[in-house]
Image (tube, helix red, strand yellow):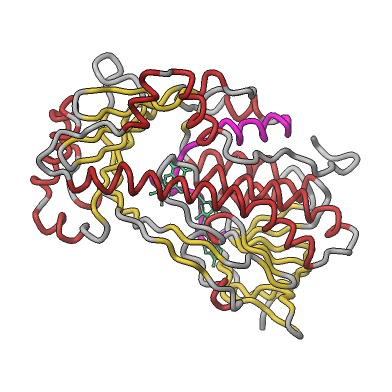
């Protein structure tokens, strides 16, 4: 026998998109339930960037100061090294916004923070350890979710179901929504190496040299390192052995050569299978997909979380009042796709251009010192141009703002 629950909105997935949507809807007085299949938010390397646009949203919600009390590091500039030449590709210092930096904090800290804030509203409920297993459909409309929680099966009826369950979501297919897959030339190995603030490079950035591409993100006490590999080559590289991989890493980041033994086994190295895709249609009556579930982004520019959160804000803006007043229509859902599709497509297009112009040729150039592409040379010669990538990465195209009301007597 299933336990039966009835809510105004059921969100599948407690990632950045789902948690932000849960918070915004609860704050607007919508009865919202977020389902998260894991028991906690602890995940390594799930994208730990909090972009200036997200910090702006937190400011608009009155939560910025409290969020920044959590331990974090700050990135104000991104530097890329081709061979021996450095170029600053983005400087966030001039963004027309409150926080002119990317905050780096573990995603679980950020999500725990959002959960704590959301739980102050009686209209919010988060069920951990609870996996959505199916959509419930009646007369062509999605009316709820079947799930499995710690106490057994659940049947959740909802006026709106939002799929925010990430890039592996199987629900779009089950709902008959088609995805379009775009080609990518790479996958990424993620791992960590200790960081010595006095001697190490001071900036986040990328390194391109002799077929090796490395991404370095400074964290409190360590480097989060991304080693970019040709698509589908992970097994071959693992087969060659860990020692050879350590050598490759040391070659790409000579300052860290003395630390590559910190990669003790392949268990320390997480593979990100890179995908770029998007749903042609994000919605059906009673159902909407946002974040990675609607469009998986390439890691180029590290903008996946940014877009997921912007989708959540746009969704809350479009659906909160209609949901609360029980007058939600499919055109409200269509409005979300119309608003977010263009920035998402334009960002994917830019990522594809970067992949073809910069990443693919550098992955092939095994014997050549990385040559700086012309666009990067221009950034070096005309520093004001660095504002363009900074804006695209830090704010994104069409930044969203909180337009949802707060219910009278609510905590904030
Ligand atoms: C290794 C790695 C590194 C990355 N680095 C960056 C970065 O530096 N910057 C950046 O911006 N982005 C980065 N990304 C991408 C970024 O993490 C995603 O774009 C972003 O998390 C998408 O948010 P989301 O809420 O849409 O989905 P997700 O973060 O994927 O969240 C989906 C949630 O749904 C839950 N879930 C899934 N299925 C179910 C179900 N059936 N029932 C209940 N819950 C379910 C999952 O457990 C998960 O918590 C990285 C991704 C990976 C994998």
Residue drawn at (28%, 25%) of the image: 195
Report the number of discs.
0
- Tell me if 261 is positioned left or right of 61 in this view: left
**Image quarter for residue 271?**
bottom left
Q: Nearer the viewer, residue 346 or 395?
A: 346
Residue at far top of view: 198
Classify 360 as above or below 259.
below
Look at the image and say whether residue 53 sits in the magenta stretch: yes
Residue drawn at (62%, 54%) of the image: 341
Q: Quadrant of the C terminus?
A: top right
Q: Quadrant of the N terminus?
A: bottom right
Q: Estimate the x, y position of residue 209 in percent, counting from the top left.
A: 19, 35
Classify 403 as above or below 204.
below
Look at the image and say whether residue 406 sits in the magenta stretch: no
Residue drawn at (44%, 26%) of the image: 90
Classify 161 as above or below 404.
below
Read off the magenta span. Answer: 36-62
- Tell me if 322 is positioned left or right of 245 in this view: right
Q: Nearer the viewer, residue 358 or 77?
A: 358
Classify 225 as above or below 334.
above
**Image quarter for residue 205?**
top left
**Image quarter for residue 78?**
top left
- Tell me if 304 is positioned left or right of 359 in this view: right
Q: Nearer the viewer, residue 31 or 250?
A: 250
Q: Estimate the x, y position of residue 11 in percent, counting from the top left.
A: 66, 60
Q: Estimate the x, y position of residue 340 in percent, counting from the top left.
A: 64, 51
Q: Estimate the x, y position of residue 307 in percent, counting from the top left.
A: 57, 46
- Tell me if 221 is positioned left or right of 110 in this view: left
Residue drawn at (73%, 29%) of the image: 62
């Amino acid at each position: 026998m299933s336990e039966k629950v009835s809510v105004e909105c059921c969100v599948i997935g407690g990632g950045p998109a789902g948690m932000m949507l849960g918070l915004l809807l609860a704050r607007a007085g919508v009865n919202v339930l977020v389902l998260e299949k894991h028991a906690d938010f602890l995940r390594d390397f799930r994208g730990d960037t909090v972009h200036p646009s997200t910090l702006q949203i937190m400011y608009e919600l009155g939560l910025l100061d409290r969020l920044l009390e959590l331990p974090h590091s700050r990135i104000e500039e991104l530097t890329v090294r081709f061979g021996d030449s450095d170029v600053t590709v983005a400087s966030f210092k001039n963004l027309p916004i409150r926080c002119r930096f990317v905050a780096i904090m573990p995603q679980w800290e950020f999500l725990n923070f959002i959960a704590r804030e959301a739980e102050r509203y009686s209209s919010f409920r988060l069920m951990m350890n609870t996996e959505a297993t199916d959509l419930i459909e009646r007369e062509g409309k999605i009316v709820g979710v079947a799930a499995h929680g710690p106490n057994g099966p659940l049947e959740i009826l909802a006026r709106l179901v939002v799929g925010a369950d990430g890039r592996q979501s199987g629900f779009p297919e089950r709902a008959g929504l088609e995805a379009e897959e775009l080609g990518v030339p790479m996958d990424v190995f993620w791992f960590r190496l200790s960081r010595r603030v006095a001697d190490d490079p001071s900036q986040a950035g990328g390194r391109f040299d002799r077929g090796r591409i490395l991404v370095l993100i400074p964290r409190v006490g360590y480097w989060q390192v991304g080693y970019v590999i040709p698509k589908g080559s992970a097994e071959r590289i693992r087969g060659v052995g860990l020692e050879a991989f350590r050598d490759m890493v040391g070659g790409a980041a000579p300052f860290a050569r003395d630390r590559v033994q910190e990669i003790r086994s392949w268990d320390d190295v997480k593979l990100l299978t890179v995908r770029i895709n998007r749903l042609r249609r994000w919605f059906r009556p009673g159902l909407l997909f946002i974040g990675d579930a609607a469009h998986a982004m390439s890691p180029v520019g590290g903008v996946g979380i940014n877009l997921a959160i912007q989708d959540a804000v746009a969704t809350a803006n479009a659906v909160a009042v209609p949901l609360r007043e029980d007058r939600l229509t499919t055109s409200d859902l269509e409005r979300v796709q119309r608003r977010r599709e263009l920035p998402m497509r334009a960002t994917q297009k830019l990522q594809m251009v970067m992949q073809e112009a910069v990443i693919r040729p550098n992955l092939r150039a095994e014997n050549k010192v990385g040559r700086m592409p012309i666009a990067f040379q221009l950034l070096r010669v005309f520093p004001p141009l660095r504002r363009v990538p900074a804006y695209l990465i830090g704010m994104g195209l069409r930044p969203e703002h909180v337009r949802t009301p707060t219910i009278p007597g609510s905590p904030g």
